[in-house]
Amino acid sequence: MLEDDFGREVSGVRVSLTDRCNFDCVYCHNEGLGDTRGPMDPQDDEMTADEIVRFLEVVSEFGVRKVKFTGGEPMLRGDLEEIIERTPDSMEVSLTTNGTFLPGRAEDLKAAGLERVNVSQDAIDPDAFAEITKSGAYEKVIEGVEAALDAGLDPVKLNMVVFEHTAGYVEGMVDHVAENSGLQLQLIEYMPELTGRPEWNIDIERVHDWLEEKADRVETREMHNRRRYYVGEDSGEGGMVEIVDPVENPNFCANCHRVRVTHEGYLKGCLNRNDDLRSMGEMSREEIRETFRETVANRVPYYGEYMVKEEGEWVVNDDYIDAPVTHS
Ligand code: SAM
């Protein structure tokens, strides 16, 4: 496995298949590219299935054993099943989706080799859901979650971004997973870095404290020191809630083992940075190998290294100001 200068092995890749989306979530960072949404039809700038598979084959040689497909909305790609089918067998395949296209396709995705799925569900209330996602497709999302469970995808995780607009729905979502043993909930701390709306932040520690009180038991995972809260176990069902809290968290960045790929085929070493993009364009396998090696070698933990704390404020580390960038 390739390792960066900070001892972080790269074991996974997160591949954006498109930046098109049928939702317009008010908080969306679009995998670190900001708001670039446009038309719904397939676009020429998207990587083809062949390009995606070639990249996955190359990185599997380096021991990368996990791929998560994302977007935009990755299920807008009609060839998603083909891409999953052609992903090297050595890689675990997961997907993050808004869920609306899972009804009618979940079984085919599972048959193609999809193992697990994250479905974004930011509220348990249709009106709030419509306001946050700028879409009235709440019922379709609920159907999509059912379809994923019926198809045997495991686990089915619900992703909820916790910020001003959703904070009031956390309790309802926690109760929802407590009553549905197949479901898990990921409460994702709202990341303001690329959305420009820091005023929507809420203090995620308060959610930790509240869950600590509510949970039957708490476990701490080695990965990112993430805490897992088990709720509703005494009811016979029960569910698991995890908080993903990367913001201003050097421990999170120190445990980042992922390289990203944009829908246009740029390698991206960090969600929060766009000054380290490397285009794979028309590259040969050997060139991709080399560029991937360089991307890994250039990876820097964002909080704690790229950003450092000075007098209580996070500021860019002087070492990286005006540092040469490696665009190709
Ligand atoms: N459309 C797909 C979906 O809904 O999962 C995939 C793309 S979406 C960008 C991937 C994940 O990023 C979702 O779980 C979403 O909740 C999360 N996300 C997007 N913007 C975010 C932000 N500003 N802060 C935290 N999480 C965010």
Image: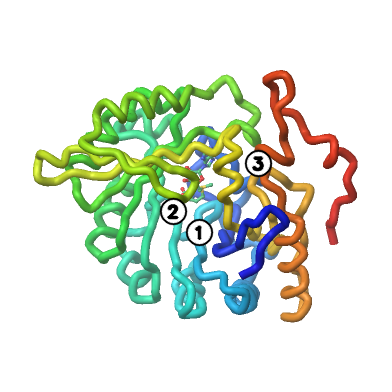
The amino acid type, in three-letter code, at marker 1 is: Pro
Q: Mark 3 sits on what residue?
A: 34
Label 1: which secondary element? helix
**Label placed on residue 74:** 1
Q: Is 245 positioned to the left or the right of 149 in the image?
A: right
Residue 8 vertical position relative to residue 285 in the rendered view, above or below: above
Tell whether circle 2 marks a residue whose Cβ is less than 8 angstroms from ligand 1.
yes
Q: Residue at x 51, y 70 (%)?
A: 65
Q: Residue at x 68, y 53 (%)?
A: 6
First reached walking from the N terminus: tag 2 or tag 3: 3
**Label placed on residue 97:** 2
Residue 164 vertical position relative to residue 45 in the rendered view, above or below: above
Q: Position of residue 17 (x, y in %)?
A: 57, 61
Q: Do the residues bearing badges 2 and 1 touch, measured as CB atoms within 8 Å?
A: yes
Residue 276 vertical position relative to residue 238 in the rendered view, above or below: below
Determine if residue 229 is in view. Answer: yes
